[in-house]
């Protein structure tokens, strides 16, 4: 399922799917033609969250810069239940996965 962002002159799409077992899928909201806000419900005992954005290949959200990285080692994770992702390309379909860390394990 994909949702079209509100600016009809810049076709940008966002979709979502879930990686955290037992929770609802994360929501993706179009903030602008080149950014989305991913949000989800808190999961008990979660220490950190990682967000993977898929546009044909997996990319990893670096929380401090709000940009995508090509490897998880280059992306800093966060503890909030939402993150804004910037620098996306209009017209590309995006999906997001959220993973949680509990007891030091993903």
Image: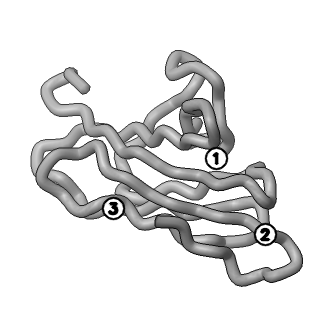
Secondary structure beneath disc 3? Answer: loop
Seen as rendered, the residue at the extreme front is 1
How much space separates mark 2 and mark 3, taking CA atoms?
24 Å
Describe residue 52's horizontal placement relative to residue 22 as left or right.
Answer: right
For marks 2 and 1, the one nearer the N-term is 2
Residue at 33% across, 61% down: 40
Tag 1: Cα neighbours inside 10 Å, few (<14), some, or many (≥20)? some
Residue at 23% across, 45% down: 20
All told, the count of numbered labels is 3
Q: Which mark is residue 94?
A: none
How much space separates mark 3 and mark 1, taking CA atoms?
17 Å
The image position of residue 11, as x and y in percent, is: 78, 69
Residue at 14% across, 26% down: 103
Tag 2: Cα neighbours inside 10 Å, few (<14), some, or many (≥20)? some
Q: Which mark is residue 11?
A: 2
For marks 3 and 1, the one nearer the N-term is 3
Residue 92 vertical position relative to residue 13 in the rendered view, above or below: above
How much space separates mark 2 and mark 1, taking CA atoms?
21 Å
Q: In front here: 18 or 83?
A: 18
Secondary structure beneath disc 2? Answer: loop
């Amino acid at each position: 399922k994909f949702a079209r962002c509100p600016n009809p002159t810049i076709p940008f799409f966002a979709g979502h799917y879930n990686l955290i077992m037992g929770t609802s899928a994360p929501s993706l909201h179009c903030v602008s033609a080149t950014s989305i806000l991913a949000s989800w419900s808190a999961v008990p005992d979660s220490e950190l969250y990682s967000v993977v954005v898929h546009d044909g290949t997996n990319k990893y959200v670096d929380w401090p810069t709000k940009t995508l990285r090509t490897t998880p080692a280059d992306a800093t994770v966060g503890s909030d239940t939402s993150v804004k992702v910037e620098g996306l390309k209009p017209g590309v379909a995006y999906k997001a996965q959220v993973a949680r860390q509990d007891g030091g394990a993903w």
